Structure formats: structure tokens, C-alpha cells
Amino acid sequence: MHSGAMETGVTTTAIFAEVLIAGLEGLAWILIPLAAAFGISASAFSGLKDWEALVTVSALAGAYAWGTVTDRLADSVFGRLHKARKRDMETDYGVTSGAARLAVLEKSDAMVAYLDYGVSRARVARDTAFCAGCMAVWSGALAVALRVTGRAATSPQGLWACLLGALVVLTASWWAQGRIASAYHDRLVEAYCLVTGMSEKIAPVVGRPDIGDQRREG
């Protein structure tokens, strides 16, 4: 099989898995606080045990559909945080990050596979941060709404645990996606420089002047 076809298959599978993960996380941030607030337990769905296959397929299909929405929203939110890096690339190299990636794709499947690994990790971390932030807001909103209406949550401790847990996950995943996105940007610049014959420009980007000296000496 042609290497390009293999790479495409792997990439498609990875994207499917990432969107599915985003969908499952997206459903979790909605349903878990609701379960804590109103006492929804697994026993409420015991009547569906004879329809496990259909329910599983339907749940996964719904999670994937919701994942496409979640992933797009997360991309819109976090994309704004990385505009500075994209502007820097356009200023320093006269090319957008998308065009740089296409240039690398044309020259090297191996480099693209390596870059796609970074994209995959960044997407999962970004979507996790987005869903954790939504869970924190949703849990807090439910707690306030129940208090205002005079209703008691079935599990107030569980609701506050959702809020605190979501804040912890948000903090960790926010940091992770920032680090991964930064590393991806650096690797994309390096790959673009290599395939376009501008390897002497790599050193200033990665902060290693000795690399440029070694390349010139070699």
C-alpha cells in the first residue's frame, strides 16, 4: 500500500477518535452535574438493558455528532490564543501556518505524520480544557439556580465536587494544550524550513544558536 494512503488512513482514524473523545467529554460535562443535582443514577436506565447494542451504537453516534460541535467551539476559543504565533510565522516567513503545513505535506509524509501526532495531542488537550471549563460553569450555574429557587440538590457535595474537579482538570489541560501548541508551532517552522531550504533559520526559532553553527560547519 502506498505510504500516503496509509498515512491518510491513520490520520482519519485519529481524527475520528479525537472527535469521539471530545463528544464523550462534552456529554459528561452536561450529564454528570445534572446527575449530582437531581439524583439521576444508573438504575434509572435499567429498563434499557435488553437494548444494549442499539443504545451503545446510538450513544456513540450521538457522542460523535456532539464531538464535532464541541471540537469546533474549542477550536474557536483556543484559536484566538494562538493568533500571535500565526502572525509571527507570516511576518518571519511570509507564509501562513496552513500553507506551511501543505508545503511539508508535499515533500515529506514522515514529517507530516510527526506533526500530526502533535496536532492530535493538542486537540485532545484543547477539547478537554474546553469541556472542563464548561463543566465548571455548568456546575456553578446549577448550584446557584437550585439555591435561588429554594430547591436542594440531591447530592450537593457531588455538585461541588464536579465544580472543583473541573477546575483542576481545566488548569492542567490548559497548561498542557499551551505547551503542546507551542511545541507544534516550533516543529512546523523547523519542518517548513527544512523542506524549503531555509534550515539556517531554524536556530533563532528554537533558541539554539549552536544548531545553526553546526549546520553551516557541516
Image: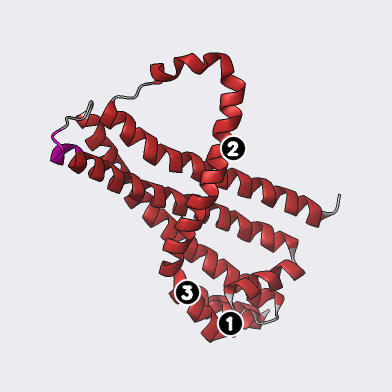
Q: Count residues near mark 2 (Cα–Cα under 10 Å), then give few for <14, some for 14-19, many for 20+.
A: some
Q: Amino acid at mark 1?
A: Lys
The percent coordinates of residue 196 (x first, y second) are 70, 79
- Classify the position of the C terminus by image quarter: bottom right
> What is the distance, in whole Å, between disc 1 and disc 2 at their CAs?
46 Å
Give whichever of discs 3 and 2 has the lower sequence position.
2
Instruction: Give the number of marks.
Output: 3
The percent coordinates of residue 41 (x first, y second) are 36, 21
Against 115, is 163 above or below?
A: above
Q: Quick one: SS at disc 1? A: helix
Residue at 46% over, 57% down: 73
The percent coordinates of residue 38 (x first, y second) are 28, 28
Residue at 61% over, 82% down: 200
Mark 3 — residue? Answer: 85
Q: Is disc 1 in contact with disc 2, using a CB cutoff of under 8 Å?
A: no
The percent coordinates of residue 109 (x first, y second) are 74, 61
The stretch drawn in magenta includes residue 78: no
